[in-house]
């Protein structure tokens, strides 16, 4: 019995493109590939480790420094902009670090390109603060100061080129990060405001609200200044209010967010209910457990119904651009009934669980197809009952969700399962529910494993595959044959520039290779799907 196939493989001229490899051997890991991997997931190597955090350091930037020494600084900056702006990076810290390094490099053109890119890469105050802190971290190693004329201009331009109302909201929501404040940056950059509205915001940040009142109370102010002044007045009013009703009215009328409130305000259930109405959907998903625990969301309550309606609303999901896997993670965390840290516990609300289940399927509209030929293969040789590290999701549900994401969004997707030395029948299809797909995977009997079997199967059956995505519970070094050799044989026979992403759902091991078409994933999270997408698009 042949595994199910969404459609027959169609020929396409871009299937054989190989844009990132550079000159020489098409599968050699070039400096540009290493740079792009670093910008994507903070490592030049072929391994992405899910949920890995921590600050970026000079130890992981050998290739970046090499490219700068080769006079390729402008090229590096363009890649930084590309990964930071297009949502290709799993983490943005590598982009901020790389931009900081370029901005302090000895070559003038590289520095100029880096400073010019600041406003494109640092899209909000938190980004800007991170960039500045990385420059400070690099100061000792680079043996130079950071607040020269070029940085002062770049920071000044960042503030001056913002929309005034957006900037007023930004400086009152994200006041400090990484030990830096807006007052620090405006003072050290010697910013000269470009217009009256920015002047008002600068005065508010550096001098305070009383100085602003004294300066603008009896003046005839332009319309934009009046708008900013009114907004800042509301922010100050809520900061000094102890009246719950007044705070709620200000939140609802001016769409204030929790970062603009006092800690005491957040002790009120009614204040939280007001915040939930306009809170970004991604933030709502993160705090559902806390809201249920504190009885802010109660069974059958109007607020609970309003949240459920938002969660499963297609327009709201599109606006927030929430990925199905994010919904699944949030749903399983909520279903768990307990936070990972602290003692917060709750009884999951059935209506919220039902809404999140509906949202999972609705959110597939947010997954943009890559347009490649995929084989997604699940290793069923061992039990799929273990939990993916750092999540509440079993490897069975994770594997089923991944197969569904590809089967539903990529036209040319084949889903396979393998065990006992051979590929076995698997009827996971695009029209299945997550529960049905999970049952289909776990009912297949286990046995010995060989993670190269899906590649061998495609080669022997004349299938041309652009990307193999292999999901396994076994250590990533457990191969009967070399995965790279199997991949090379498939390339030679099919004439396709095939790539392989090996996902060890619970593994911390990996197989090092010198083939840029092979990438390992340890654990699994939303970032892993971004890595797979980047591999498929020949970006890393």
Image: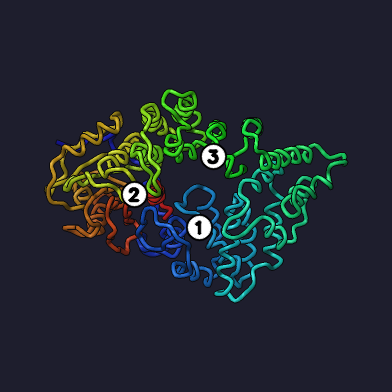
Instruction: Pinpoint residue 502: horizontal percent, then vertical percent.
Output: 29, 53
Query: Quick check: marks 1 and 3 in contact, CB under 8 Å?
Result: no
Residue 273 visible in the shown view? yes
Mark 3: give few (<14), some (14-19) or many (20+) Cα within 10 Å. few
Q: Is residue 149 left or right of residue 221?
A: left
Which sits earlier in the primary sequence, circle 2 or circle 3? 3
Instruction: Pinpoint residue 234: horizontal percent, then vertical percent.
Output: 70, 38
Question: What distance separates the C-alpha of mark 2 from that of mark 3?
Answer: 35 Å
* Residue at figure coordinates x 82%, y 39% from the top left: 222
Q: Nearer the viewer, residue 250 or 486?
A: 250
Query: Quick check: marks 1 and 2 in contact, CB under 8 Å?
Result: no
Instruction: Pinpoint residue 535: horizontal percent, then vertical percent.
Output: 38, 51
Query: Vertically, is 185 above or below 139?
Result: above
Residue 267's disc is 3
Question: What distance separates the C-alpha of mark 1 from that of mark 3?
Answer: 33 Å
* Residue at figure coordinates x 54%, y 49% from the top left: 85
Residue 524's disc is 2
Q: Is residue 540 left or right of residue 130?
A: left
Q: Which residue is mark 1?
A: 93
- Which residue, as the protein is rendered here, is positioned at the far bottom? 143
Q: Nearer the viewer, residue 203 or 2?
A: 203
The part of the image, by quadrant, that contains residue 1 is top left
Q: Nearer the viewer, residue 39 or 488?
A: 39
Q: Nearer the viewer, mark 2 or mark 3?
A: 3
Residue 529 visible in the shown view? no
Query: Vertically, is 456 above or below 100?
Result: above
Mark 1: give few (<14), some (14-19) or many (20+) Cα within 10 Å. many
* Residue at figure coordinates x 39%, y 26% from the top left: 351
């Amino acid at each position: 019995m042949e595994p199910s196939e969404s459609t027959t493989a169609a020929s396409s001229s871009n299937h054989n493109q190989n844009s990132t490899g550079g000159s020489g051997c098409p599968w050699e890991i070039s400096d540009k590939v290493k740079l792009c991997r670093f910008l994507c997931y903070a490592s030049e190597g072929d391994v992405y480790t899910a949920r890995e955090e921590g600050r970026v350091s000079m130890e992981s930037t050998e290739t970046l420094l090499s490219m700068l020494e080769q006079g390729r600084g402008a090229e590096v900056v363009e890649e930084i902009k590309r990964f930071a702006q297009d949502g290709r990076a799993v983490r943005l810290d590598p982009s901020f670090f790389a931009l900081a390094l370029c901005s302090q490099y000895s070559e003038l053109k590289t520095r100029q390109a880096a400073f010019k890119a600041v406003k494109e890469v640092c899209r909000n105050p938190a980004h800007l603060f991170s960039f500045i802190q990385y420059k400070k971290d690099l100061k000792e190693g680079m043996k130079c100061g950071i607040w020269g004329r070029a940085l002062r201009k770049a920071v000044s331009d960042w503030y001056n080129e913002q929309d005034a109302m957006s900037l007023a909201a930004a400086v009152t929501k994200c006041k400090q990060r990484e030990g830096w404040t807006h007052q620090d940056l405006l003072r050290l950059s010697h910013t000269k405001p470009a217009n009256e509205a920015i002047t008002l915001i600068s005065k508010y940040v550096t001098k305070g609200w009383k100085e602003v009142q004294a300066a603008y109370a009896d003046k005839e102010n332009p319309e934009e200044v009046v708008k900013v002044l009114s907004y800042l007045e509301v922010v100050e009013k809520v900061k000094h209010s102890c009246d719950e009703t007044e705070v709620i009215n200000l939140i609802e009328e001016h769409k204030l967010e929790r970062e603009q409130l006092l800690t005491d305000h957040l002790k009120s259930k009614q204040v939280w209910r007001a915040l939930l109405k306009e809170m970004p959907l991604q933030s709502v998903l993160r705090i559902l457990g806390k809201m249920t625990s504190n009885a802010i969301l109660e069974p059958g309550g109007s607020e609970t119904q309003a949240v459920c309606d938002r969660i499963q609303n297609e327009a709201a999901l599109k606006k927030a651009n929430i990925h199905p896997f994010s919904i699944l993670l949030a749903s399983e965390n909520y279903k768990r009934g307990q936070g990972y840290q602290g003692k917060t516990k709750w009884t999951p609300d059935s209506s919220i669980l039902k809404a999140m289940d509906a949202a999972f399927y609705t959110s597939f509209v947010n997954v943009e197809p890559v347009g490649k030929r995929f084989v997604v293969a699940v290793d069923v040789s061992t039990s799929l009952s273990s939990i993916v590290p750092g999540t509440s999701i079993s490897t069975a549900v994770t594997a089923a969700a991944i197969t569904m994401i590809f089967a539903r969004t990529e036209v040319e997707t084949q889903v396979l399962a393998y065990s006992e030395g051979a590929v076995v029948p698997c009827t996971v299809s695009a029209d299945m529910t997550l529960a049905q797909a999970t049952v289909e995977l776990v009912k297949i009997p286990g046995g010995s494993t060989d993670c190269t079997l899906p590649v061998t199967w495609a080669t022997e059956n004349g299938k041309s595959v652009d990307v193999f995505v292999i999901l396994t519970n076994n250590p990533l070094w457990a191969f009967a044959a070399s995965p790279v050799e199997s991949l090379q044989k498939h390339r030679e026979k099919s004439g396709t520039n095939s790539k392989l992403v090996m996902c060890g759902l619970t593994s911390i091991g990996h197989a090092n290779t010198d083939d840029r078409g092979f990438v390992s994933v340890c654990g699994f999270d939303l970032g892993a799907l971004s890595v797979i997408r980047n591999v498929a698009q020949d970006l890393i």
